[in-house]
Image (cartoon, grey):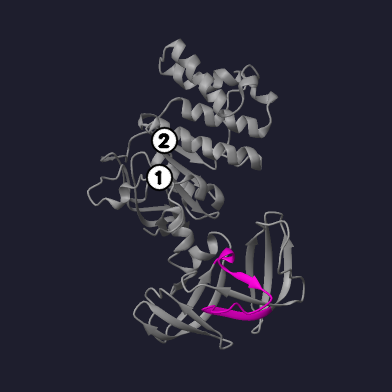
Amino acid sequence: MKSLGSIRRSFAPWTDATAKPYIVFENVTKKFSDFVAVNNLSLSIYEREFFALLGGSGSGKSTLLRMLAGFDEPTSGRILLDGQDLRGIPPYKRPLNMMFQSYALFPHMTVAQNIGFGLKQEGVAKAEIEKRVADMLKLVKLEQFAQRKPHQLSGGQRQRVALARSVAKRPKVLLLDEPLGALDKKLREETQFELMDLQQNLGLTFIVVTHDQEEAMTMADRIAILDKGQLMQVATPAEVYEAPVSRFVANFVGNVNMLEGKVAERVEKTARITGASGAQINVENAGEAKAGDEVTFAIRPEKIKVSSRRPEGAANAMEGEIYDLAYLGDMTVYHVRLADGQVVKASALNSARVTEDPLTWNDKAWISFAPDAGVVLTR
């Protein structure tokens, strides 16, 4: 059985036609005066799903989150939670919690008191509050800071307290707006996996807003990519990366090479694409492209091999020269200038301490890739 990318777990209700979505955005539009923040958007999210809204500034992702939380109302359309229309229901009556980009901690309370505040307001027993607070402190690695006040913490530590406070109440849906932005790289990576484990253990639905592609790819079961208030693609991380539906998505997620050309020949699913310089690209799956169509062949750097000689039997090979390179320890990144002047990026894992085919600046080099290594895009 073949699949796009590694499969993290079997949870995939969106593939079941009988599964009922837990959260539904139904033809939702949100306008601020003449500005359209969200444009006729429809989206379904399932119970216990870890869902990411990914996009740049002004894409509408935070507006979607605020409408779900009840801080903004849609200009038109409906938002349903477990079948109930949320219009008119105030935020405090919705079975969800939201962690904002701002920390909003109580300055006069200790870290432990901040985390347990919501539980105390709900009348949770003292012993249960203490247990949950201890669990949350361990999760965010702040056990030794339990009795400190917010002003005695760093920005990253304050954000971790806000995260712990949001999770402590165990809402049915947890909304996270750029939750890990203030953490350093190593702690951010650790917290991503801890959030995934927590979400699965508690059986909650998590919706995270982020502009960090790696964060979305790591944590989410599915990702919705937004641009200018419109939904560009909704898919698993592997599908978004390996099978983007448009040039925008391919270019937005990860590094990619875009080779322009025309479909010279189409035979069943396979096709031959001719580039501007006459270079031929043989592809295994041409998608919707027809003979004569102007297309873009998108291929990721790690799918391209670089060598000093033309590989024997290579289905796709192009000659160029090393324009630039970067040794990053675990991998080497090559920039190869082709005959038509286009620079192609290729990356190679440094799986051995020494290389048998060393290449450096201005060396002649060949790039090669398999017929199924890229994707043909028509839009």
Whole-percent x, y for residue 125 in the image = 42, 12
Whole-percent x, y for residue 197 in the image = 47, 35
Looking at the picture, tell me which residue is in the foreground, 288 or 164: 288
Q: CA distance from mark 2 to mark 1?
A: 11 Å
At 54% from the left and 40% from the top, the residue drawn is 192
Whole-percent x, y for residue 320 in the image = 67, 80
Answer yes or no: is residue 249 visible: yes
Mark 1 lies on residue: 9
Residue 69 location, quadrant: top left
Looking at the picture, tell me which residue is in the foreground, 366 or 25: 366
Circle 2 packing at 10 Å, graded few (<14), some (14-19), many (20+), is: some
* Tag count: 2
Q: Amino acid at mark 2?
A: Gln
Q: Quadrant of the C terminus?
A: bottom left
Q: Secondary structure at mark 2?
A: helix
At 47% from the left and 52% from the top, the residue drawn is 60
Q: Amino acid at mark 1?
A: Arg
Q: Secondary structure at mark 1?
A: loop
At 58% from the left and 31% from the top, the residue drawn is 160
Q: Is residue 99 magenta?
A: no
Q: Earlier in the sequence, mark 2 or mark 1?
A: 1
Question: Which residues are the magenta region?
Answer: 300-320
At 49% from the left and 63% from the top, the residue drawn is 249
Q: Are marks 2 and 1 in contact (CB under 8 Å)?
A: yes
Mark 2 lies on residue: 200
